[in-house]
Image (spheres, grey):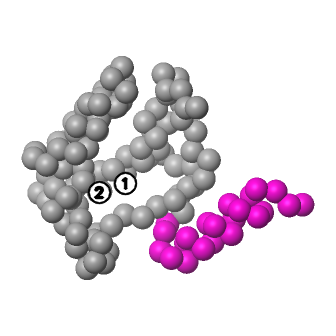
Amino acid sequence: MFNEDSRVKIPTLLHLTRLGYQYISLKNNKSYDPNTNIFTHIFDTAIQEINSGIEIDTVKRLYEEITLDLENEDLGKAFFEKLTNRSGIKLIDFENLACFIRLQTYFTLFIFLLTDLSCLNTKVSIY
């Protein structure tokens, strides 16, 4: 039987895993937070990689702040400001972004993929 899974998803997943992406299954994944769609173990590792020397307690506090920011009624403005902040704790390493584009620091990039991730936040409407 031909459907979206057999013609699109599975071939795409196979191709992307061959390119170096790591497939993540939602089954029995204890680090997935359905309220934020964040995998906490990946988040913790990435933040510690970007902000060397940061304590795990600080990372957990940052995650709680992001969770609160995502609850705001500001259409993501607070989260965007935290995402693009260039001082303090960084969510994106803008200084090394150019190195990534030249593939010199490819090993520090976290590449994952999954399919059909539902959004449980009922405040968000996607049209």
Q: Mark 1 points at which residue?
A: 42
Does 10 appear in magenta?
Answer: yes
In the picture, measured across the screen, residue 87 lies left or right of residue 60, that is: left
Residue 85 position (above or below residue 110): above
Looking at the rendering, the stretch of residues picked out in magenta corresponds to 1-22
Which of these two is toward me, 18 or 80?
80
Q: Horizontal and vertical percent for residue 123?
A: 48, 22
Look at label 1 and name its amino acid: Ile
Q: Which residue lies furthest to the right in this view?
A: 1
Q: Horizontal and vertical percent for residue 111?
A: 42, 64
Q: Horizontal and vertical percent for residue 91?
A: 24, 49
Does 108 appear in magenta?
Answer: no
Residue 103 position (above or below residue 114): below
In the picture, the quarter occupied by the C terminus is top right
Say which quarter of the image contains residue 8.
bottom right
In the picture, the quarter occupied by the N terminus is bottom right
Say which quarter of the image contains residue 114.
bottom right
Look at label 2 and name its amino acid: Ala
| Dot 2: element | helix
- Does the CB distance between marks 2 and 1 fall below 8 Å? yes
The number of numbered badges drawn on the structure is 2
- Measure the C-alpha gap from mark 2 to mark 1: 6 Å
Q: Name the residue under label 2.
A: 46
Q: Horizontal and vertical percent for residue 71?
A: 36, 24
In the picture, measured across the screen, residue 9 lies left or right of residue 102, that is: right
> For the residue carrying disc 1, how many other residues have a C-alpha within 10 Å: few (<14), some (14-19), or many (20+)?
some
